[in-house]
Structures are given as structure tokens and as C-alpha cells.
Amino acid sequence: MSKLIGRVQRILMTPAAEWPVIAAEPETTAGIYRNYIAILAAIGPLAMFLKTTLIGYQVPFLGSYRVDFTSGLITLLLSYGLALVAVFVFAKIIDALAPTFGSQKDPMLALKTAAYAMTASWIAGIGQLLPFIGVLIGLLGAGYSVYLLYLALPHTMKTPADQTVAYAAVSVVAALVLFWITAMIVGGTVGRAGWMGAPDGWFGGPVVKRDTEADEHSALGRLAEWGKEIEAAGKRVEKSAEATGGVPSGAAVGQLLGAFVGAGSGEALSMEEIKAFLPGTLGGLPRADLSAERNAALGFEVAEAKARYTDGAGRNLNLSVKDTGGAQGLLALASWAGVEQSREWDGGYERDYRVDGRMIHERWDVASGAGEYGLIVGNRFSVEINGHAASIDELKSALAAGVDIARLEAIAASAKK
């Protein structure tokens, strides 16, 4: 532990002197995960768990709000798992972009770069326990991590001085796009178990092994294919840079980022198109308001339409349709990763399960007479209804009658061709 604390102190206090040491020392992926990443990446999720389950949030006029222990623990595990994955993905981005900026590709050094540069952000995660200034601490940590990345690249990836700023900037932007899309998808993806493993083969479904290769139809096999697409896109960036004297084409870089997010057609439905899936009435209730937004970053688009339905006397329903557009590959990964689970309490339950290949989430609470029901359609769309009803079956019927699921499936299928 003293070695870990010493490394953290040096990377935060004297990074310019520490990066050459980090670059030169021998390391393995397992070693850096076990001795550094796995420990520091837990700080933020643990702080969030303590805040939400033990300390609670102060809600004006309502007092302190806490989540139940089980929900808090599930969130802790999911957040921690995603944090571990995020380091790996960030390292892949750094390594894939290296030739673009005259740097040397090296997966191990890229992992070192990602892991130690994220130190400031991980340490700043403790700020979640502090009221008011927690967000500021988080922003400062993120900003300092960007600075650490800038200092690292000349030593770890052998980046020329005139390319360091651009390399750091593009790496950060690419990572932010990836994490932004992931957050949007995870926030709206049905199933709260998400990215955790399952006994009968990780990421759902049995894994058939042939000479250490996963069955191509299993989730693990699809993840392997995803990795091959990223590698192929990285090679296209290198060839493009060679053909143009060191500067790759925008199309080649776009294909690389597209491979990272599992890009499909690259376009989400327009606001008018996605709003058309929200009916004028739902479950016998008139629509009270309707909104839609469509966002794009580096060519990857996501769109969402939301509507509220009410009788004005306390019965309300909310309906949303999300389109992951060019990043639909990430939603497919979330679907493959979906784990069937169920929990019950006095007067209610929550379940995540599969039907005909779809991930479905439902939650019902008898005391409040409210619940939620959602599903992933064509590994591209997320559809969810929530609110007050006589039963969960009423919510299911309202969604089935109000949203043209078959049409969404057809759109998703046509984009894959």
C-alpha cells in the first residue's frame, strides 16, 4: 500500500519527473490492474455508495433522501465495472491514434498512460461525499487528468513535441464522445444489471470454446469481432497518414471512432421522425406535452423523444423513445451484456429478462400504484413507459398499443444492410 500511495503522490505532485520512471519500468496488464487501477477506480463508486445509501441527499423541503441498500450496492458494482472497462477503452483509443500523431503504438504503454493519467479523476471521486463543492472537485480532477495525459505522451508514446497538444486533445475528445454516448445509453437502457457477468458464459448466453476462440454467435465472440473492427480501422488511419505525408484523412479518423462506438448508419432519426412514434393518447390519457432532441458529436448522433400523458387528476404516464443512431453498436453490447435478474420486496418487484432476443425491464410497486416497463428494439432503440396504472400489464398494453414496435424493428434492420 505504501508503494501505491507513493506513486499517487508523485504522479500528482511531480508528474514531469514521474512519467519517465513509469514509461521505463516493466509492467503487465494484470499487474497494473491489480495493484493500481482496481484500487483507485473503486474510490468514486464507493463514495457514491456511501453518499446515496448512508449519508443521503438533502432535497429542499423534503429532507434527506436515501436509496435502499440493495439498489445502492447494484449501482456500486455497475459503476465500478464500467470504471474498469473505461480505462481499457481509453487505452485502446490512445494506442489506435498513436501513428496519427507520429507516436509509437504500444498497448502496454497506452494502458500505463490511461491508468496513471486518470489518477487525478479517481482521487477526486472522494469529493462526492462533500456537499456543494463535490462537483467542483470532480471538474478539477478531470482537468488535472487531461494535464497529466499531456505530460505523459512524450515519454510513454514517444510523441513529438509539436504533436503532443493535438494528440492529447483528440484522445480526450474521442474518449468524451465514447463515454457520453455510453452514459446516455446506460441511463436509458432497460435492465439495471447491465454489464455484469453471468455464470453460463460472461455477457449472457453460453460460450463455446474452440482452441480458445469464442463462438462467433456468443456475446464474447461478438466482442472479439468488435475488437477486430477497431484494429482494422486503426490500420486504415495509418495507411491514410502514410499516403498524405503524415496527416490522415478525416474519413479515416471518422471510421476509427465509428469502430469504437460500433457505428451503424451514423444517423439517428430526425426530431420529427422520432416524435411520430409518440401517440396523441396513451392508455386512454391525452398527451400533455411533447419534446425531442437530437445531438451529434464527431458525426455520431443520438435522438430522443419524450411525452407526458395525464388526466389532470393524479394519473400520469411518461413515454420515451431513444435512438442510438450511429452508436448502436454500444447498445448492442449492452444487450449482449444483459443479465437476467429478479428481486422482490413487500408489495413490489423488479425484473430484467429476455424474450425473443430482446432485453426487457419491468418494475412494479403496489403501494404507489406505479411502475415502469421498457425494452431494447433491434439493438438500436430503447423504449420505456412509466407512471401510474392499475397494474404492470396495463403499462405493457399501453406501450404495445401506442408505439409501433414493428416499425422501429424495421428501421433498425434496414440500417444494418
Image (cartoon, rainbow, N blue to C red):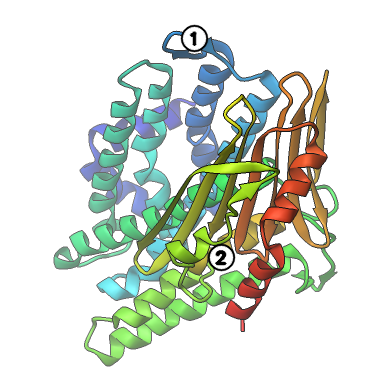
Front position in the image: 379 or 252: 379
Q: Residue 50 appears at what percent x and percent y?
A: 54, 18
Q: Amino acid at mark 2?
A: Gln
State the residue at coordinates (36%, 48%): 22
Front position in the image: 245 or 160: 245
Element at badge 1?
Answer: loop
State the residue at coordinates (25%, 58%): 169
Q: Amino acid at mark 1?
A: Leu
Q: Residue 101 appears at what percent x and percent y?
A: 26, 71
In the rendered image of this protein, does residue 42 appear above or below residue 112? above
Q: Residue 408 appears at what percent x and percent y?
A: 64, 67
- Looking at the rendering, in which quadrant would you find the C terminus? bottom right
Badge 1 is on which residue?
62
Q: Is residue 413 visible?
A: yes
Point out the tag, 1 or 2, that comes first from the N-terminus.
1
Badge 2 is on which residue?
328
Pick out the residue farthest to the left: 162
In the rendered image of this protein, does residue 172 appear above or below residue 417? above
Which quadrant would residue 9 be assigned to in this image?
top left
State the residue at coordinates (49%, 23%): 47
Instruction: Assess disc 1: are there few (<14), some (14-19) or many (≥20) residues with their C-alpha within 10 Å of its C-alpha.
Output: few
Element at badge 2?
Answer: helix
